[in-house]
Amino acid sequence: MPTTLRDAWADLVLGATCVGCARPGRLLCPWCETALPRSARPAWPSPVPEGLVPPYATGPYDGTLRQLVLGLKEHRLLALRGPLGRLLATAAQAALSDVRGPVALVPVPSRPSSVRQRALDSTYDVTVAAARHLRAAGRDVTAVRLLRTRVGLRDQAGLTANDRAVNLAGSMTCPTGGLVRMARRLPRVRIVVCDDVITTGATAREAQRALQSVGLEVVGVAAVAATRRRVDRVPMRI
């Protein structure tokens, strides 16, 4: 079916509109898809959590990028996993610019209650899509669920930077079972922590801590977007 007819059919039957410009048709129209970022840049939070590995994002968390993230996470628009996966792959590729050999993309874990409520683990799904794109480009990459959250972890929405850090301190673990299975498949693997949005960096830093605590080498953080006031900030060196 030609693109124009497919878009017209989707609008008539599904009532679909583009999340970026509200044009009737596909969830991401060809014009908005073409305008998506094709590269990623450093996205240091401010202030930078001590010891955070280099984080990368494709752009600020607003406009179409924000609508893509929210469309999947909050409205379960599953077709958006594709474009979000391509964006995350771009950020992961930037984090891996000096890395050779096998790589595991490890998503930050979602709270089990959120996964049950939404019937969706959006971060993991997008990470899987990103790994697929990187393999197609010739990288030895796989997506691996290694992290779990502790009971009692609060929703991060609305928390201040300090509250986020307190809430997340010691909140993630890396169970032995996943490590053993990964070691069999991917010896000497390097790790990229993956998330949809970098905000304060507390989530990424806690994921990094949990992974490093079991001897894994974390080389970077990749995200689709970063909050605008934090994009391209370079940490102070003392």
Image (cartoon, rainbow, N blue to C red):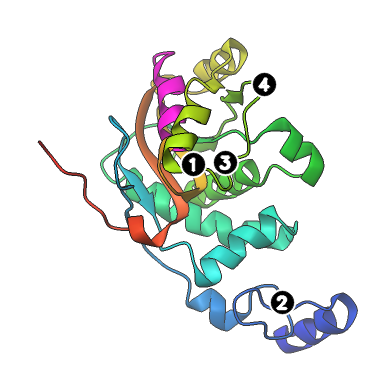
Note whether 210 is above or below 65 in the view shown: above
- Marks 1/3: CA–CA distance: 17 Å
Residue 128 relative to residue 38: left or right? right
Residue pointed to by mark 4: 151
- Which stretch did the figure color magenta? 203-215
The spot of residue 232 in percent (x, y) is 28, 57
| Residue at x 65%, y 56% (from the top left corner) | 81
Q: Work out whether residue 32 can be spotted.
A: yes
Q: Earlier in the sequence, mark 4 or mark 3?
A: 4
Q: What is the count of numbered marks?
A: 4
The answer to which quarter of the image holds residue 181 is: top right
Q: Nearer the viewer, residue 1 or 94?
A: 94
Q: Circle 3 — which element? A: loop
The stretch drawn in magenta includes residue 160: no
The spot of residue 176 in percent (x, y) is 57, 11
Q: Residues within 10 Å of mark 1 (few under 14, many from 20)?
A: many
Amino acid at pointer 4: Val
Q: Circle 4 — which element? A: loop
Amino acid at pointer 1: Cys
Q: In which quadrant of the rendered image does the C terminus lie?
A: top left
